Every structure is written in structure tokens, then in C-alpha cells.
Amino acid sequence: MSQQEKTLEHQGLSEFYEKKPKEDVIDIFKTVLESNQNDLKDEELAFILNTLEHYRDQPDFRKLWKIMENNFHTYKQIVEFINQHQDYTNLIKIYLDEKFNLITVVEILAQIDNLLETSPFIIKNRYFQKLAIQKTASAVGDSYDLFIAASMVKVFQVTNPDVDFSKIKEKMMVYTEIALLDKLKLRNVTLKDIDTYAHISTGNLIKEELKDNKIISKYKILKVLHELFYTPVVSVGVILQKLSPSNQEELREVLKNVLRSNISEDFFQHILAAFVDEKGSYHFPQLFAYLSKNADERLMLSFIKWTANNLQLDHHYHRALKAYLKSHPRSVWKNKTARKELGMIATSSFRKLVKEVESESANRVLKYSKKYGIQLISILLITLAVGSGLYFGYDLLTDKRDKESVSKPNKAVASEPDKNLNLDPFTEWISEEPFVFNVNGQQQKLTFGQANPTGGKSLVLTDSQNIKTPYELVIDSEVSPFDEKGVLKDSFSLYHTEYDFDDNGISRVVIMALSQTYESFIWVYSPISDNGSVSLRADLSLKGMSDAKLVDNTLKLLGEQGQSETYVYLNQQFVKQ
């Protein structure tokens, strides 16, 4: 089409549209299209395009386009002309934007199929290609179930056999995968999701093209997860080496979540991998706590036997297993058959461990016998013999304290802490000794337990003016390190430290109750000075499965579900990352 014909709108057609009734213009438009069995002449094509341009912002534009669609041959010629002349792209853009004004993946895929069935030549239009790819990916990212939505795109095929949709489909799948990874929360991934992802992944995501490290990380982690769970695995540790250290740490958290509802003997290597520490060993206390919460007794026993036969057991393993067998409310040691099976493990180091547990358990019973008399020891022995599930006041079926459990004397530290355990910067809190710290150069004292008139879980702050203020160590949890009378349980020790989270010269008071099985409770207080008097503001209280690590302006620990949790101190408050 010549430049002269392109400008007919300005050489007389404007006056034509103004003088002619709209209905007459539409009739002429329709006549021009229907009267041509062959290609439109240049002046006819110019009239069609200028008419569309004139009505582009009016409702009649849709009516005109519908008339074009009903005349296949001339419609094809017009669209192909638009494809080749970018000046008219806005005309088809209006039409396609309306066609793709959809929300769900199902609707968008159906629209693509319909357009290519009725107007197959539209596949050459770049704007159509762009919308098909972007709209589909966006709908996948907005879907309730990302994996189901992406699977729909994966199996989609156009019904028109004369249309080659393969190249667009390839790009559509790449952008669908990117949208899925962008919105995916790895902590929510299931075993089924991992397998589904492997089937929909293109394998074509390249870091240099994406320039999005988070998406690349998720991509790599999901690939490794699929290899771990759905291919023959000789060594989980070797496979993990394919990831960077930071990605390995993230994958371990995903493993804990995935395995929580899929624990089996097939995945014992995977369980170990989820608790690898920074030195290449394992966080055995957290591992046993995790398994005791998520595995039944049969699996727990199988895991212990498997580790005894397949690992080079070190003192960390022995110490953690012994603490679990002796002290955990759900310990398999309470089952006579399980004790017998553990005693049959052939390795000399394990036999030594079993004998130590037997000896120390017997000594514990003797200790309680001396302390509470023959009547209590008889009750305990009968309870263990009939397997009722009660263990020193615990209901093992519900993990709650029995209402008639034995009350223990008031003491802050009853368990024997591991002398090799590094709890820096925490200091063990002996109940008779006050925790002394300074606020604005004035000495403050915190006392606990026997040093308090009230005893139990009540702290007493004595400031420089000898004003005493009580504070309770409370936490939002069904379980507690204290018994009903506020006495610290025998299995817990108490620790304290000062720590300057924001490096402003003002230290916070951090208190931690930690059990032999690494069950922990943490409290953080900020000293507040007002007119010479000092009080404590409660900033944080947490329950976890490890001791607390204080690094820069963060507090880190394993949460109740076995996941690493980080709390950052910003603007005078803690924010969970």
C-alpha cells in the first residue's frame, strides 16, 4: 500500500465519516469485505484499515472486527498486512487485549485454541505470541495450585492440525516454569510436587538469561530433590555437593518438611542429610527430637539399628542417643521388646552404650527410691512393667504432664549439662547465684529459684536502689520447662547472657532453658531506665529444638518443626525472617 493510500483518512475520509451516518459506513464496510472473493484492492484495504482506525475507541470497533472475522479470506489478508506493518499493530492489539482479558489457565488455553482454530494465520502476529506466552505464565503464577496449573500448560495442544504451535509452546513452558518458581514457596513443597516438577521442567533455565538468583536456586534445589527421591541413590551426600553451601542449607529445611509426612526406611539417608552440620557431621540431638515427633516407635527403632550398622558412630551420636533413650518422653527404651532389640546390636561401641543406658536408668530409679521411698519406686516399676505409657509424670500418648505427677524440689539446674557443649556466650545459671549486669553504670541483679522468696519460674529484678520487681518466664506453648508448681523440671538447665543486638552499647538480657534432648525455651528482655529506676521489657519468647545462637543482630535456632528460624533485631523489635 502506497503512502498516499495510507493517508486517505486525512484527504477526504474524515469528512466522509462525519457526513455519513454510522450505520451507512458499517454497511459499506461489510459490502467491501463480502463482495471480494479475491484479494482486496489497495484502496479497499485502505478503507477497511482507516475505518477501523476511525472507530478504534468506540464500541462499534468490536462490531466491525466481528464482520471481518466472518469473511475468512479478506480477514486473513488484513491480519497478514497488519503483521507486516507495525503502524497498524494497535488495531489488532485492541482486539487481542479484549480476547485475552481472562484470568484462569483453562480460559486462556481455550482462547488460544479457539483463535488458532478460527484464525490460524494469527499465529504469525507477534503480539498474539507475546500475549499467549505472558498471559499463560501470569495465570500459572496466580493459580491456587501452581503444579496443577503448570501441568495443564504442559499437556496443552492446539486442535488445528495445520498450525505449528511447537515453538510458541516451548517458550510458553519456559515462562510457565519461571512463573511457578517465582511464586513457589519451597517450604510447602510435597513429594508429589517434586515429581510433577520434574515432568514439567524444560531444563532450559539458564542463569545468564534469567539474572534472578532466587529462581535459579529453586530450580537447582528442585532438580536435586527429584534426583534424591525418584532415582536410585548411592550417596545422598554426594548428590548434595551439586549445590552451593547456601542452597544445601535451604534444601535441608525442605527435606525436613517433605519427610515429615513421608518417613520410611527408604529415606533414612535423606533424614540424615537434613541434619548435616557445618562440619560434615550431624545435629544428632535435633535429629532424634525430630524423629521422635514424626516417626512411630517401629521406625524409630529401625532408624537407630540402621545408623548403628551403617555409620561410623562418634561421641556426638552416642551422647545424643543416650540422652534420648534415657530422658525423652517417647523414648523406645520404655518398650521391653525394643530394649531387647537394641541389646542385640552387635557392634562393641553400641553394646557399651546400651549398658550405660541400662546402668544409668537403674541408678535413676535407685535415686528416686531413696528420695521418695519404696512406695513411689514400686509404682514406677509397675508402670514400666505394664507399659501404660507413664514416665515420671508424663503421659506419653499426649505428651502432657499427668495431674498427679511427682512434685520436685525447687532448683534451677537439675540435669548434668554436657561439659563439651559450646553454649557461648551463655553462662549456666546456678539458682543461688544472682545474674549481675549493669544499666547506665548502675548494677542490677536478677535472681531465680531458691534465691527468690516466691521461687519457681518467677524472676526478681533488684535495681541499684534495692527496689525488687518480679517477672515471670512465660511462653505461648502447651509445654513448659516448669512443672505445675513453677519448678524447673529435672531435665532442664537454665542459662543467661547479656547481648548487644544493635551494637549501640545497650545489652539485652537473654535467658535460655535447655533440656538434655535440646528442647529449648528462650526469653529476651530489654532493660528500660526511667528516672533512675530500671524495668525489663519482654521483647521475645520462643520454643525451639536447639540452643540459641546469637550472631550480629540475629537470634537463630531450630524451630519446633525442625526448621532453622532467624529473628533479626531491627528498630527496637525482633522480626522473623
Image (cartoon, rainbow, N blue to C red):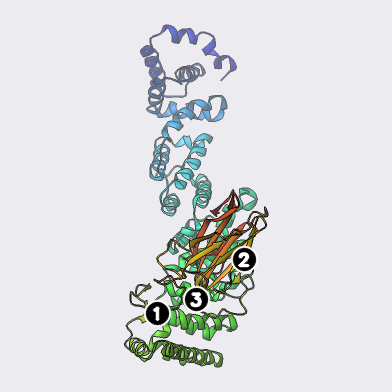
Q: CA distance from mark 3 to mark 1?
A: 33 Å
Tell me: residue 148, above or below residue 76.
Answer: below
Q: In the image, what residue type sits under mark 1?
A: Glu
Mark 3, residue position: 411
Mark 2, residue position: 436
Task: Tell me where residue 404 appears, x and y as whole percent.
Answer: 33, 77
Q: Quadrant of the N terminus?
A: top right
Tell me: residue 71, above or below residue 497.
Answer: above
Numbered label attached to residue 312: none
On the picture, is 275 further left or further right than 301? right
Mark 1, residue position: 297
Q: Nearer the viewer, residue 406 or 181?
A: 406
Mark nearer the N terminus (2 vs 3) = 3
Quadrant assignment, res 534? bottom right
Q: In the image, what residue type sits under mark 2?
A: Val
Helix, strand or loop at mark 1 = helix
Q: Nearer the viewer, residue 546 or 416?
A: 416
Mark nearer the N terminus (3 vs 1) = 1
Q: CA distance from mark 2 to mark 1?
A: 45 Å
Tell me: residue 369, above or below residue 184.
Answer: below
Q: Is residue 563 visible?
A: no
